[in-house]
């Protein structure tokens, strides 16, 4: 017995590990779509705010793009001419995909929403156009039913978390595609329109019971008893809070954009999987490592890999044969 | 949306699928241990009771042995001369492993236990000698610490269920070896000395919280908070029953040897994994398929594959270099 040690209980998985695997797949897929000597795909990135975090994120995206065979064209524009600049990029055949750094008008979400809809569907690498969002919420995976060759694009951060959960084997590949989270209970802390709500919907559409938590309360997203429905349904859980949902959860996902918020470690189940997608640390690292089986402290690099994955899908969607793989 | 269908929710996995994969590994391992032209290993099987189920099981074992490059020598003996026959086989270099069909004295478990201990440790393919059992309960994996070349043998049915759970991806390979069930809650219905108790110990030693249920009540097997201990500990749960543990359980394992017993489907969690190792059907098949994510209706063929896996390990243990793989 002296020769055996208790293995460390918490495995910390860095975004980099997950991103590298995805980027390998993206490069392979790009060769399939473009041929080995195809043109470098071009991403036009619009920076119209003064947020240093956005500028930093753009910098990282540029580096990842260029390392993986993509062109990244950062276009710093005044917010008053942003709409015209996007329309020009929509019409420019040399631009394969468009990304815009939000928020542009922090006090006017409707105006940001208007800009999201300005991006052409065929260049919407962020999956934020209404058609893409509608398909995601309705668990519709293709833009061209019943042919089903052109894939609908999923928003980057939620999809990055799905990819992380696949990497962590929380998606069980033994189960049928579309049901691979059946039996899992997941809490998502954040219900924003860009991240938390789409994420809860995606996870519920794959079979999970998802508790979506924000300051207004708790909602549960499911596909009903025995996951008999195609898409999720949402119910309010009156009077519920983190104290009710965390002890039930196999997976806890934090995305609260403030320094102050921390997930209460004592409520987390022994052996839970904890993932942070906020730019702040939503978990108390040392404490969570004493309790979780897996801890993913950040997700940003996976989000950039997913952005390139979406771009390759957009390019494939423009070809007559579309996306042949699942 | 008309072009998409809700995928069937419950995946039924047959023992045959799991057994075939294991038998492939066993044949590979045998070539490694014996060389490509090595002698066929020989299993001596002692049938000293009149149980038609045992005779049938021996028949299946013989077929699987012969299909996979092993000799199976069924020896029908009177129970009064069984002990001497085992001693002879212990001393016979032509016999690589020994299996005995229990019960021999259904009303005298102590006498069966005496026979189990009569089998030589080096030929105990069923993992029922005290040294093997002691190591299993104490989560000690080798017979020769600190060299750790000679693997301790685990009992066949419990190990078959572990192998099934690995196949079903309930063991998470992302986690450290030895902790791969951390965060999982499992109910085992049966606490016999041959099957249920060793199974609960094995699963708890791998990090699970295991509710072990029999007619005397519920015990919980864990490695403590944060799985900080090397081996499991056991606590009685006074007054608990299936109604308390089934709704908490990710995995439900039935091993009750009667026609009458059925796991109450309404208590099983939506999306749970259900496994039956009884020779009777402990689950109501049609109902459980409406609720479970995965259902394994029987395990017998996996048990036979594990028997051959153990036999190859015994042979490797006799070589100076022992078992080099994990």
Image: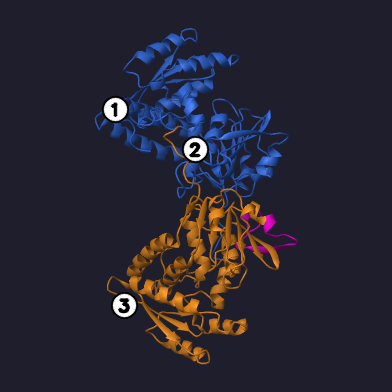
Chain colours: A blue, B orange
The residue carrying mark 2 is A162
Q: Position of residue B76 (x, y in %)?
A: 45, 86
Mark 2 or mark 3, whichever is nearer to me: 2
Q: Residue at x 70, y 36 (%)?
A: A241
Label 3 crowd bin: few (<14), some (14–19), many (20+), radius 10 Å: few
**Where B73 sits versus A305, above or below?**
below
Task: Look at the image and say whether residue B232 sits in the magenta stretch.
Answer: yes
Q: Position of residue A7 (x, y in %)?
A: 55, 56
Mark 3 or mark 1, whichever is nearer to me: 1
Give the CA distance from mark 3 to mark 1.
59 Å
| Image: magenta residue range | B223-244
As helix, strand or loop, the secondary structure at mark 3 comes to: loop
The residue carrying mark 1 is A320
The residue carrying mark 3 is B39
Corner quadrant of residue B179:
bottom right
Q: Are marks 2 and 1 on the same chain?
A: yes
Q: Position of residue A287 (x, y in %)?
A: 64, 44
Label 1 crowd bin: few (<14), some (14–19), many (20+), radius 10 Å: few
- Dot 1: chain letter: A
User: Is there CB contact under 8 Å for labels 2 and 1?
Assistant: no
């Amino acid at each position: 017995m002296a020769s055996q040690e208790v293995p460390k209980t918490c495995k910390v998985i860095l975004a980099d590990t997950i991103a590298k695997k995805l980027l390998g797949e993206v490069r392979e897929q790009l060769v399939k779509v473009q041929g080995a000597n195809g043109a470098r795909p071009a991403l036009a990135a619009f920076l119209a705010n003064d947020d240093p975090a956005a500028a930093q994120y753009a910098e990282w995206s540029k580096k990842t793009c260029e390392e993986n065979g993509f062109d990244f064209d950062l276009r710093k524009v005044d917010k008053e001419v942003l709409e015209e600049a996007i329309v020009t990029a929509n019409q420019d055949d040399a631009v394969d995909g468009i990304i815009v750094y939000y928020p542009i008008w922090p006090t006017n979400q409707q105006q940001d929403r208007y800009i999201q809809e300005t991006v052409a569907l065929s260049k919407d690498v962020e999956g934020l156009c209404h058609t893409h969002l509608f398909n995601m919420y309705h668990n519709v995976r293709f833009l061209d039913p019943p042919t089903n060759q052109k894939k609908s694009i999923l928003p980057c951060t939620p999809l990055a978390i799905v990819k992380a959960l696949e990497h962590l084997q929380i998606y069980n590949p033994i189960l049928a595609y579309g049901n691979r989270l059946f039996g899992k209970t997941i809490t998502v802390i954040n219900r924003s329109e860009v991240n938390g709500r789409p994420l809860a919907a995606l996870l519920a559409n794959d079979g999970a019971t998802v508790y979506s938590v924000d300051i207004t309360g708790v909602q549960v997203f499911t596909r009903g008893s025995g996951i008999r429905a195609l898409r999720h349904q949402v119910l309010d859980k009156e009077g519920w809070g983190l104290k009710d949902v965390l002890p039930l959860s196999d997976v806890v996902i934090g995305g609260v954009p403030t320094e102050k918020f921390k997930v209460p470690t004592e409520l987390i189940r022994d052996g839970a999987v904890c993932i942070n997608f906020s730019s702040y640390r939503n978990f108390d690292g040392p404490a969570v490592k004493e309790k979780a089986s897996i801890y993913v402290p950040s997700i940003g690099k996976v989000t950039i890999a997913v952005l390139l994955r979406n771009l390759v899908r957009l390019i494939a969607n423009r070809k007559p044969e579309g996306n042949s793989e699942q």
